[in-house]
Amino acid sequence: MLHTAPVEGSKPIKKRVTKAERSNIQINSPLDEIMIGLLLGDGHIQSRNGNSRFIYAQSSLREHHLNYFNHVYSMFKPFLSKEFEAKSRSFIDKRTNKTYSSISFTTFTLPCFNHYRNLFYNNKKIVPSNINQLLTPRALAY
């Protein structure tokens, strides 16, 4: 069964989704508000093959940051493959020679993310001119 909106206890969508199923997947409240807040921070949208996908990454992996990451990850599980696992990596900053770690996830490429791509990107990431209409207390919290 295909879930079209993240709800408490919902399952991730299957690995392959038909074009018709893709067009029926929507981002409903409160996730639409949360997307606005995340895109003002660590989230971004990547355009692929006419549709878009949401990518979220954090580089600081202190315990409270990891708890927050897991919270965000759980909200987007309905937009991920059943087999998907968050990706972690380590890298060395060549300027400081320090090692950093990051963790990220990437959703399916879906038409429902195009709206956010159109709002936040104009060849590069921007703050939308109507941000005052988009911001809610929930969006600000994220």
Image (cartoon, helix red, strand yellow):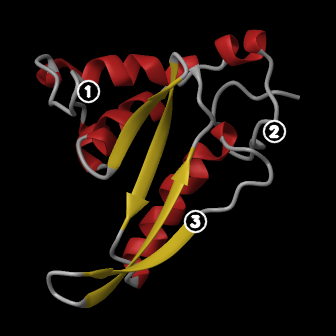
Dot 1 surroundings within 10 Å: few (below 14), some, or many (20 or more)?
many
Q: Which residue is mark 3?
A: 87
Amino acid bearing label 1: Phe
Q: Does residue 72 appear left or right of residue 26 in this picture?
A: left
Q: Which element carries disc 2, helix, strand or loop? A: loop
Dot 3 surroundings within 10 Å: few (below 14), some, or many (20 or more)?
few
Q: Residue at x 48, y 24 (%)?
A: 113
**Front in this rendered view, residue 64 or 45:** 45
- Coordinates of residue 115 in the picture (x, y in percent): 40, 17
Q: Residue at x 60, y 62 (%)?
A: 86
Q: Which element carries disc 3, helix, strand or loop? A: strand
Q: Does residue 72 appear left or right of residue 120 in this picture?
A: right
Q: Residue at x 75, y 29 (%)?
A: 3
Q: Does residue 37 appear left or right of residue 18 in this picture?
A: left
In this view of the protein, can residue 30 be seen by the observer? no
- Coordinates of residue 17 in the picture (x, y in percent): 79, 25
Q: Is residue 115 above or below residue 32?
A: above
Q: Residue at x 53, y 64 (%)?
A: 70
Amino acid bearing label 3: Lys
Q: Which element carries disc 1, helix, strand or loop? A: helix
Q: Which residue is mark 1?
A: 120
Q: Which residue is mark 2?
A: 15
Amino acid bearing label 2: Lys
**Front in this rendered view, residue 89 or 71:** 89
- Coordinates of residue 25 in the picture (x, y in percent): 65, 20
**Front in this rendered view, residue 71 or 21:** 21
Picture quadrant where residue 1 is located = top right
**Front in this rendered view, residue 92 or 126:** 92
Disc assigned to residue 85: none
Q: Are marks 3 and 1 in contact (CB under 8 Å)?
A: no
- Coordinates of residue 6 in the picture (x, y in percent): 63, 36
